[in-house]
Image (cartoon, grey):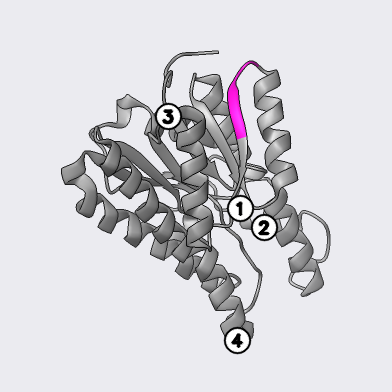
Amino acid sequence: MGDRLKGRNIVVTGAGSGIGAGVAADLADNGANVVVADINVENGAKVADRISKAGGMAVAVPVDVSNRESIKKMIAETVEAFGSLDVMFNNAGIIQTASYLEITEADWKRLMDVNGLGVLMGTQEAAKQMIAQGGGGKIINTASIGAKQGYPQFAHYCASKFAVAALTQAAARAFAEHKITVNCFGPGVVHTALWDQLNREFMEKGISSKPDQAINDFSTDILLGRYSTPRDIVGVTTFLASSESDYITGQTVMVDGGMVLI
């Protein structure tokens, strides 16, 4: 256990699995008090339990990031548990495989409500709490290679992640006077349950013909020659949560193995 983040009270949404679970565990390993927030209460509790058994400090809190009252309740429970909110990770997100012509209004709204509106409201409510506390804070959003490039199988997902990058820049400008920095990180192809979902959807739609073909085909342009795991991401996320990133705001830090060079 390190003390790089000792005394920092941090929320990670979507921390019940995937990238969020890895981010939460590394934050705790570096001394943070972590709220593992997820719409799947059981998954969140399992992650918090693993962190606690490893010697870290974590509590599980349910949240639906598409619902403002749920976000407010999550932040209130964070403050009740740890005394303040110092860092907010708006990480929760969903994806769907659909050709450009297949995307429906319902598909668009579902992804935008979680990936776009969820980040807007999470940022708003975190900023309100940090402003009330005084002393600044950090808000960190999960973007994607899809925030820099539009992919035809995921047009609505990419649009939602472009929105994340825009919201991050706007929030950085809005809250700088309160000493709140706002950044995002952009993962590429990360082998998590999300990509297991995409592999299945690619096969169901006839885009690929065998398991793991989708993730392998999508990884061919990665300069470092392989897809990533959450362990490849957490160096950047813990850095963004630490005092070492205090002079960085409004940025999207790509962590994609050299897949998108922008």
The image position of residue 256, as x and y in percent, is 50, 45
In this orientation, does residue 231 appear?
no
- Looking at the rendered structure, the kind of residue marked 4 is Leu
Whether 56 is among the magenta residues is yes
Q: Which labelled disc corresponds to residue 83?
A: 3
- Looking at the rendered structure, the kind of residue marked 1 is Thr
Residue at the far front in the pictured view: 80
Mark 3 or 2: the one toward you: 3
In this orientation, does residue 57 appear?
yes
Residue marked by disc 4? 101
| Whole-number angstrom distance, CA of label 3 to CA of label 4 | 49 Å
Q: Earlier in the sequence, mark 3 or mark 4?
A: 3
Mark 2 or 4: the one toward you: 4
Residue marked by disc 1? 220
| Whole-number angstrom distance, CA of label 2 to CA of label 4 | 22 Å
| Whole-number angstrom distance, CA of label 1 to CA of label 2 | 6 Å
Whether 26 is among the magenta residues is no
Q: Residue at x 71, y 27 (%)?
A: 50
Q: How many numbered discs sit on the rendered protein?
A: 4
Residue marked by disc 2? 217
